[in-house]
Amino acid sequence: MAIPPRERDDLVVARVLPASELLQRLARIDGRGYKAYKSIAGEYDFGDFRLIIDHVQGDPYAAPTSVRAVLDPEVAGFPGKLYANRSRRIALEDYLNRAFLRAISRFVKGHRGSGKSGMVAILPCGQEILERTSVRVSGGRVEFRFVVGLPARGRTVLGREAQVMFSEEIPKVVKAAGCYRNLDTAAVERHVATAEDQDALREMLPGMGLVAFIGDGSILPRRSGVSDEPMNRDRAVPFRSPPSLRVRVCLPNRGEVTGMGIPFGVTLIVGGGYHGKSTLLRALERGVYNHIPGDGRELVCTLAETVKIRAEDGRRVEKVDITPFIQNLPQGQDTTCFSTEEASGSTSQAANIMEALEMGAKVLCLDEDTSATNFMIRDVRMQHLVAKEKEPITPFIDKVRQLVTEKGVSVILVMGGSGDYFDVADTVIMMDEYVPYDVTQQAREVAERFRTGRKEEGGGRFGRVTPRIPLPHSIDARRGSKVKITPRTEERLQFGREEIQLAYVEQLVDVAQTRAIGDMIHLAQARYFDGRKTMAEALTQLMRDIDRHGLDMIAPPGRIRGDYARPRIFELAAAVNRLRTLKVRQLPRRDS
């Protein structure tokens, strides 16, 4: 299917004009209708930087005007060591984004008219250090991408107010954030070094036989249920690793650190309610990202291929082979190619696992609180009452060892309600008032002393992970004659006529990731989903191309976007799988 052309900006940059020309144009259009602002599009020399107005908003209530500020290396003045590798460059860009936000709060007056008049904004930042398009550092050159709400009263241009913004406020912001000499240079170095250490630590894990590491002294609890900032240190219990699980690592900048290593295999996190089990798991889920200095989780790292799994009642499932967990459904419904518009807790959790494995997950994180009970365990009493031939679900407990031995996939599981999992665990960590204890030996002794008598129901092998091929005609971002891709929130993405629900894709951390996912799906439909490549092959190729060409390649034609943050392949695939129009074709079945 041909892709309709996307709307293009009407900017054609002919030459660089002096900043005075911009101010004169603003003076000339003062008091005119809002459309007169279109005349200011162009590139202007402000001495220390160039200002590029890429796209001018149509009215004061529309999406604000897209602006870039570019500082050459001799003006920006950042030492090469701060962007010497990919890890350092992304961290430096992240720091400059935050510096720009701080400078806005210092120098920009803010609201001055109707609608978005007077605003200056750049991507907001959370606790994670993400690859974004809002700041670009290349060879010492710094580029900020931000938006400006051009001042108006009603739909009348306030040219004098705009002059103040462009001649006074914005230059102060750009120079405060973009010149090395104006920044806290020790803080810049610390930010970059912290990220580099986390990337190095994550890469060390496989060689140490670990899937995760939590540094001693880490602050895992968050301030509240709606804040991702760390709990105040006078209230939080610093993390302290059990001696039996303590490992030492030497990081490029921080040097030697100690912490708890979680080994390959099946790890249970147990303990009483409100003692920190889920807090530890949430920190591990987010350990796929680097965190800013002061977050408390700077030394919490998990393998990059770690995926959080949960039940997701009501999600759509499209032709997923869930036979490792569910077979022989009533009415003879086929589970080798299972589809439903409204999945149950157990079928959704089975599909979520199989889709994660399809994309190459190496660690699965599960919490009993967000899992379907009948998916996790079938105890001996239920086995006696309901015969296996009448129960289509093979519980996770009977498949978890096969995941490890056959698929090389580790599992980290919070479990407070079933000691049956002691029989399949390699490591058992008990949280007691937010302090971890290695109780693996005690758990084995309990399992030996109190045998349950339950029968394994998992069969001899795990089963196959069936690749699926997305059919491009089923993915359409058009709504009417136009492409419509809009993130409503971090958890909701409008894609054409469909709304993709992402509330239970728990490792999405930023609405800018959701925005990028929408355009990545649209690009995948046009270039990568060709009816021959599997989902994993197509999305892996897309990610490799982004590695080579940058996140800018996903932008609509003719647009320069400063509002993307890069998602992982797992969240991208999760969004594709939750698109209710998606159609796929399974590869021919082969022996497992």
Image: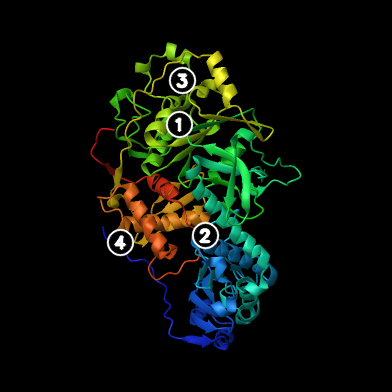
* Residue at numbered disc 3: 378
Dot 4 crowding, Cα within 10 Å, few <14, some 14–19, many 20+: few
The percent coordinates of residue 208 (x first, y second) are 51, 42
* Residue at numbered disc 4: 3
In front of the other: label 4 or label 2?
Answer: 2
The percent coordinates of residue 547 (x first, y second) are 41, 60
Q: CA distance from mark 1 to mark 4?
A: 37 Å
* Residue at numbered disc 2: 87
Amino acid on which the number 1 mark rests in the picture? Gly
Question: What scheme was used to colour the molecule?
Answer: rainbow
* Residue at numbered disc 1: 345
Mark sitting on residue 318: none
Residue 154 position by quadrant: bottom right
N-terminal label among 1 and 4 = 4
Amino acid on which the number 2 mark rests in the picture? Ser
N-terminal label among 1 and 3 = 1
The structure residue drawn at horizontal position 45% and vertical position 48%, both measured from the top left corner, is: 571
